[in-house]
Image (cartoon, rainbow, N blue to C red):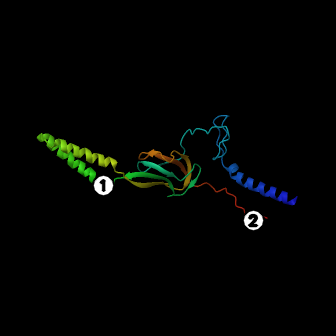
Amino acid sequence: MKKILGVLLVVLVALSSWELPLWLAPTATPTSTSEVTLPGRFVAAGASAPVAESTPGRSIQAPRAGRVWEVYFTVGQRVRKGQVLVKLAHSLQTVEQQHLQAQIKQQQALCLQLEAAASADLAAARTMLQDLQQKLANTSPALAFDYVTAPEDGVVTTRSVIPGDYLSTAQTVASFVAGMPADTTLLLSSVE
């Protein structure tokens, strides 16, 4: 009997220590009676998530255009200054692509000269230009990565990207509130 009570007590302590941070966190006020939101993390079964009326805090923006490769944060997460939040992929021209573009410019200039002179070599020059453009279209660009980082310590309040999204320069990635709230995590020093 003592063993069963001891196990039940351990289970009760474990469940209460998991729930306590949820009880201590500020609760969001539901916008209608059908929406029940538990603090910061969950939406009750059958309820829809409330729509954000405004974006609280500062916005974090992408430094350049690119595709979101990975997202390293969640809403409500504490972030430190310089912490990587999003990995952006963008293309770079390879040496081969740069060389082909230079050849295309030269060939276009040659085509213009031949058109002005009404030369018979114009058809061959245009064919060569089309071949160069086709080669350029078939080459793959190099892939490079840029990282969006937290500008200062704070808590992320909204997330507006998912992996696969294409971002333009200065597009908002997330919003956050500066400053770190007090840590309410309970630590168990000993278990008897």
At x 23%, y 48%, the residue is: 105
Question: Which of the two labelled residues, at mark 1 and mark 2, occupies the earlier sequence position?
Answer: 1
Residue 58 visible within the image: no
Q: Is residue 32 above or below residue 79?
A: above
Label 2: few (<14), some (14–19) or many (≥20) C-alpha neighbours in 10 Å: few
Q: Is residue 50 left or right of residue 16?
A: left
Task: Estimate the x, y position of residue 141 in percent, counting from the top left.
Answer: 36, 52
Q: How would you rate the neighbour count of disc 1 (Cα within 10 Å): few for under 14, some for 14-19, many for 20 or more?
A: some
Q: Between marks 1 and 2, how big is the CA–CA gap?
A: 65 Å
Q: How many marks?
A: 2
Give the amino acid type for the residue marked by disc 2 in the picture: Ser
Image spot of residue 92 (x, y percent): 36, 53
Q: Quadrant of the C terminus?
A: bottom right
Does residue 89 appear in this view? yes
Q: Position of residue 180 (x, y in %)?
A: 58, 55
SS assignment at label 1: helix
Q: Quadrant of the N terminus?
A: bottom right
In the picture, measured across the screen, residue 76 lies left or right of residue 100, that is: right
Q: Quadrant of residue 153?
A: bottom right
Give the number of the mark in front: 1 or 2: 1
Name which quarter of the figure residue 17 lies in: bottom right
| Residue that carries the numbered disc 1 in the rendered image | 96
Q: Is residue 28 left or right of residue 189?
A: left
> Are the residues flagged by discs 1 and 2 in contact, CB closer than 8 Å?
no
